[in-house]
């Protein structure tokens, strides 16, 4: 394991004397990034600074938040442990970063006249990642950020004088009502301009009331508004070198800059953290469905390569004349897929290998496709223990919290059930073609071949990363955690024995009463 990690770190060291086609594309470029403070944005910033030494300035569109200035928020980005290697290897990285005050919720991105003019004059490459990723977001907010934000970015890009490439980051699930998702832009029934007008003028209560009608077959406001945003890209793309990048479920880093880094509880990460701490014991999930998960560093590498490919395609006369917008579905490949059942088995194995001190109970987790069995499990494995513990807390004069915690967990479970119960056929022809056309140097620096992904190693590092970065439980505590885990195991077994005895006693009591009635 140590040898493999050393090899990965060695691979990560860039030989600045030898450039690749992609590095040359970024030489001297000014880059605008929206959503740079997010999970995907941090890895993108880190990769550009470490692997594209010829870049000029990275402009980060950042909104002031909680009485913090834009500069303060930009500085806080680099406080994340994922930037430790960058800060050790280079002290001049900050000269390449400039925060720009802006907000996708505001008209024209909330840019000042001076900043807008500067971006128009200097920006060459744009990565638009800013979005609200909450599945249960109010439709008005989702439209303003995801749809209107995309429209404002495209309007800004049309004014840029030296634009080379625009990457609009979407999601592989934009058209999830369909079984097969091709690398193309699909027409939608809802007009983007009408929706933006609704969000601007319609009262909140009325818009909330008609939201289910507007969503139609889409399961949530996130996927719906991202689909509408893609249509905005299509209608506003004239003369703009733009492409749409659709990643699958993005989880931790595979190897770059460190193994297993993660900074959020979204999707499968929340499931692992919940199961590993003993809180989550059941999930409605199809074990035979493909888990369309991708490492964030491979996702970013593919995104960077796509920006170069968009530029190359736009300059190609045949593509330019056809007016087609390249779409990249960055998903798992059929040659190297993982099912949700395999994902559960592997993460459970690593959960037993690397238990956490934050666990409140032993790992007892299972998947089921049956709705009734799932609801019964929730009642007896979630709500009943939570109710008993909260009653005990009240008796001890403490604030009850577990029931409220489970309400949030179940809300999260209901949201992800749509994706864990279904299977899709994602076509990845453009992504595979891009990989095949890259030089060997590019493939080494910007590796994103999902066929070569080692799932066992990746999921092991993923679990360790959740333990370290999210649960704030350093790996040095594993020996202590194993001792606690052993104690929780025997407590779990004792509780099971008590429950079996109670069930047997109740069954025996009713059986005895039944025989008594029959004999009488």
Image: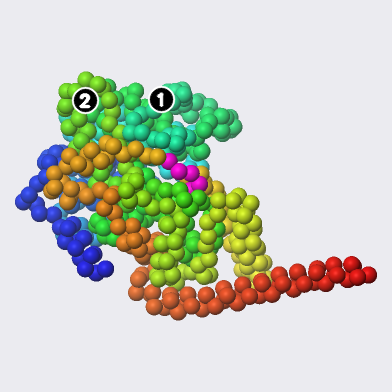
Compared to residue 223, the image places residue 352 above or below, namely below
Per the image, is 422 magenta? yes
Residue at coordinates 11% horizontally, 45% vertically from top-left?
A: 20
- Residue 319 - label: 2
Per the image, is 297 magenta? no
User: Is residue 28 or residue 417 the one in the foreground?
Assistant: 417
Labels in figure, total: 2
**Magenta residues, as a range?**
420-424
User: Is residue 408 or residue 101 the one in the foreground?
Assistant: 408
| Quadrant in the picture for residue 254 | bottom left
The quarter of the picture where the N terminus appears is bottom left
Say left or right for 113 vs 228: left
| Quadrant in the picture for residue 109 | top left
Compared to residue 330, the image places residue 507 above or below, namely below
Where does residue 425 sit, x and y in percent of width and height?
40, 40
The quarter of the picture where the C terminus appears is bottom right
* Secondary structure state at the residue bearing disc 2: helix
Q: Which residue is mark 1?
A: 187
Where does residue 84 sit, x and y in percent of width and height?
24, 60
Residue at coordinates 16% horizontally, 46% vertically from top-left?
A: 442
Where does residue 33 sit, x and y in percent of width and height?
27, 41
């Amino acid at each position: 394991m140590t040898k493999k990690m050393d090899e990965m770190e060695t691979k990560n060291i860039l030989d600045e004397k030898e450039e690749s086609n992609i590095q040359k594309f970024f030489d001297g470029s000014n880059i605008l990034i929206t959503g740079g403070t997010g999970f995907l944005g941090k890895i993108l910033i880190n990769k550009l600074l470490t692997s594209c030494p010829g870049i000029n300035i990275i402009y980060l569109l950042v909104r002031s938040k909680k009485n913090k200035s834009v500069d303060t928020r930009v500085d806080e980005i680099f406080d994340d442990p994922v930037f430790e290697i960058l800060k050790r290897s280079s002290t001049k990285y900050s000269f390449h970063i400039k925060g720009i005050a802006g907000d996708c919720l505001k008209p024209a991105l909330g840019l000042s006249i001076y900043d807008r003019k500067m971006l128009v004059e200097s920006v060459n490459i744009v990565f638009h990642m800013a979005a609200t990723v909450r599945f249960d977001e109010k439709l008005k907010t989702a439209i303003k950020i995801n749809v209107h934000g995309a429209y404002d970015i495209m309007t800004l890009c049309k004014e840029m004088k030296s634009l080379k490439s625009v990457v609009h980051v979407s999601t592989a699930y934009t058209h999830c009502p369909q079984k097969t998702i091709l690398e193309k832009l699909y027409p939608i029934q809802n007009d983007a301009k009408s929706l933006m007008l609704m969000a601007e003028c319609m009262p909140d209560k009325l818009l909330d009331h008609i939201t289910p009608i507007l969503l139609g077959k889409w399961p949530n406001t996130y996927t719906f508004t991202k689909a509408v945003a893609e249509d905005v890209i299509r209608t506003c793309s004239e003369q703009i070198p733009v492409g749409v990048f659709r990643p699958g479920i993005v989880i931790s880093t595979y190897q770059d800059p460190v193994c297993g880094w993660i900074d959020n509880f979204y999707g499968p990460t929340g499931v692992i953290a919940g199961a590993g701490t003993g809180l989550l014991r059941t999930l409605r999930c199809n074990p035979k469905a493909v888990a369309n998960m991708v490492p964030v560093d491979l996702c970013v590498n593919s995104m960077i390569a796509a920006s170069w490919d968009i530029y190359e395609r736009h300059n190609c006369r045949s593509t330019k004349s056809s007016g087609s917008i390249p779409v990249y579905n960055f998903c798992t490949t059929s040659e190297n897929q993982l099912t949700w059942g395999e994902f559960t088995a592997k993460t459970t194995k690593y959960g037993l290998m690397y238990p956490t001190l934050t666990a409140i109970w032993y790992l007892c987790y299972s998947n089921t496709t049956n709705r009734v069995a799932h609801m019964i499990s929730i009642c007896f494995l979630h709500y009943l223990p939570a109710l008993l513990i909260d009653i005990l807390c009240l008796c001890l004069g403490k604030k009850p919290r577990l029931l409220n915690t489970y309400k949030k967990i179940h809300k999260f479970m209901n949201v992800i059930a749509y994706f864990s119960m279904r299977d899709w056929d994602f076509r990845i022809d453009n992504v595979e073609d891009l990989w095949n056309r890259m030089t060997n140097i590019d493939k080494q620096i910007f590796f994103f071949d999902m066929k070569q992904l080692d799932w066992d190693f990746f999921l092991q590092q993923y679990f360790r990363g959740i333990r370290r970065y999210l649960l704030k439980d350093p790996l040095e505590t594993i020996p202590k955690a194993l001792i606690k885990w052993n104690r929780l195991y025997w407590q779990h077994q004792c509780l099971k024995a008590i429950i079996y005895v109670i069930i047997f006693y109740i069954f025996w009591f009713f059986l005895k009463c039944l025989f008594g009635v029959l004999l009488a």
